[in-house]
Image: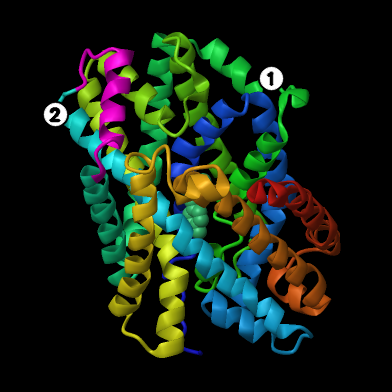
Amino acid sequence: MSTHNVWTHKGTFLLAAVGSAVGLGNLWRFPYLAGENGGGAFFLVYALTIFSVGIPILIAEIMLGRSSRRSPIMGMRFLARTHTASRAWESIGWLGAVSAFVILSFYSVIAGWAIHYTGLMLTGSLQQADATSIGASFEALLATPELLLLYHTLFIAASALIVGLGIHRGIENGLRLLMPSLCVILLVVLAYSASLGDLGAAADFLLTFNLGELSLEGWLAAMGQSFFTLSLGMGAIMAYGAYMPGETSLTRTAITIAVLDTAVAVIAGLAIFALVFGAGLDPGEGPGLMFVTLPLAFAEMPGGALLGGIFFILVLGAAISSAISMIEPVAAYLVERFDLPRPQAVAAMVIASWALGLLTVMSFNLWADDSLFHRLFDRSAFDVLELLTNILMPLGGLLIALFAGWALTHGEVLKEMHTNERWFRIWRFLVRFVAPTAVAFVFLHTIPQVEG
Ligand code: PFF
Ligand code: NA
């Protein structure tokens, strides 16, 4: 393994990890989940989980990748070889691979919607349209499985192409341009939605922390989202960490990732809710929230068609840089373990995930109201996959925390962490006790939900 790749630049890990973290989770999933779960209380639980559980696990996950210098499955096997229950720890890698398939399968379908909206924007189709007709056009998209399938296929193929070509040139340079542009456009959108909509109401909604209002489902969704948004617990960050140069600071890097990711989610949330309240829309609208509110702002802005087009292209870029990080750990495993050529490894992963994505495609139309999933779990296939994500990612994170906190020795950790004793102790307390307690709390309440 001495030939294992290392990123070409010192800052690339950060760039790649931020590329993985910032994506549909921030722009699409965070606002709609916050909207469905009452706003501020959701945000509070989400933010607390990110800082007390997410960052420590993020540090642990990067550490495992960097010290093994292998893909997650092989890396866990390597790190666990001298520990008791080594087989059980190895399951961390496998669990991550399963999560990657599941998440990519629906992520790609949703990213496909952004392809559609890029087209609608650039052709000016929604200019001057009102809330009702924009809502209707979204409904029409969902009602057309052929179209969803086409976009899903395009998106997943584009992501596969990039990973297949190797991650260095394309991603490194692409992200350096993409992330700052996304930030700027997001701020422009925020300014416009503040002037068209009601920023005060949006801030109230998102920043009034009334914990009493949060249902158990809301707690679960908020904690699940904090794992999702940081790409935690599934090997994506571990796989990138394997290419990270040894001297970079884990703690500082992890905090930077979390802060940037949270900032993007908050800006997107404020922009969207300002419009929601300004136009009298419903914040609990669900997965369509971003695709109905933002086009509304673009419809009324001078130059909105172009700006909207650019915005959705950036959404696509952010989504692709996340999708890549779901493909990479599985593809790297297939290459390492079976000596598959990289393109074949990527194809195998992506084709399986593409097929699973058909469930999500149909859950918005043919299977919207009735399906095997409704009969078994009382919810649509898409909702089942999302719920599964909310279980798999925290579970992976839990195991990573336990492994890093209890199985790795003091020496093994300090070798990677190069930190002082005090930070080390804080970190270890968080991964040993706080993270496991938090995740256990989620499971105690989620498992009954799945059965019922
Ligand atoms: N963190 C990404 C987002 O917020 O959009 C989603 C994600 C990427 C989840 C990579 C998991 C993953 F491995
Ligand atoms: Na994110």
Q: In the rendered structure, which amino acid carries the disc numbered 1?
A: Thr
Is 135 magenta? The answer is yes
Please tell me which residue is depicted at 74% across the width and 70% down the height of the picture.
404
Please tell me which residue is depicted at 49% across the width and 49% down the height of the picture.
373
* Residue of label 2: 123
Q: Position of residue 66 (x, y in %)?
A: 59, 74
Q: Is residue 286 visible?
A: yes
Label 1 packing within 10 angstroms: few (<14), some (14-19), many (20+): some
Q: Secondary structure at mark 1?
A: loop
Q: In the rendered view, would you say 275 is above or below 451?
A: above
Q: Is residue 178 visible?
A: no
Q: Position of residue 72 (x, y in %)?
A: 55, 75
Report the magenta residues as a range.
126-145
Please tell me which residue is depicted at 40% across the width and 56% down the height of the picture.
105
The numbered mark, 1 or 2, whose residue comes first in the sequence reads 2
Label 2 packing within 10 angstroms: few (<14), some (14-19), many (20+): few
- Label at residue 208: 1
Q: In the rendered structure, which amino acid carries the disc numbered 2?
A: Thr
- Dividing the picture into quarters, in which one does residue 435 lie? bottom right
Is 101 magenta? The answer is no
Disc 2 under 8 Å from ligand 1? The reply is: no
Please tell me which residue is depicted at 42% across the width and 69% down the height of the picture.
328
Q: Position of residue 448 (x, y in %)?
A: 72, 49
Left or right of 172? Residue 53 is: right
Q: CA distance from mark 1 to mark 2?
A: 39 Å
Left or right of 427? Residue 256 is: left
Q: In the rendered view, would you say 111 is above or below 186?
A: below
- Label at residue 274: none
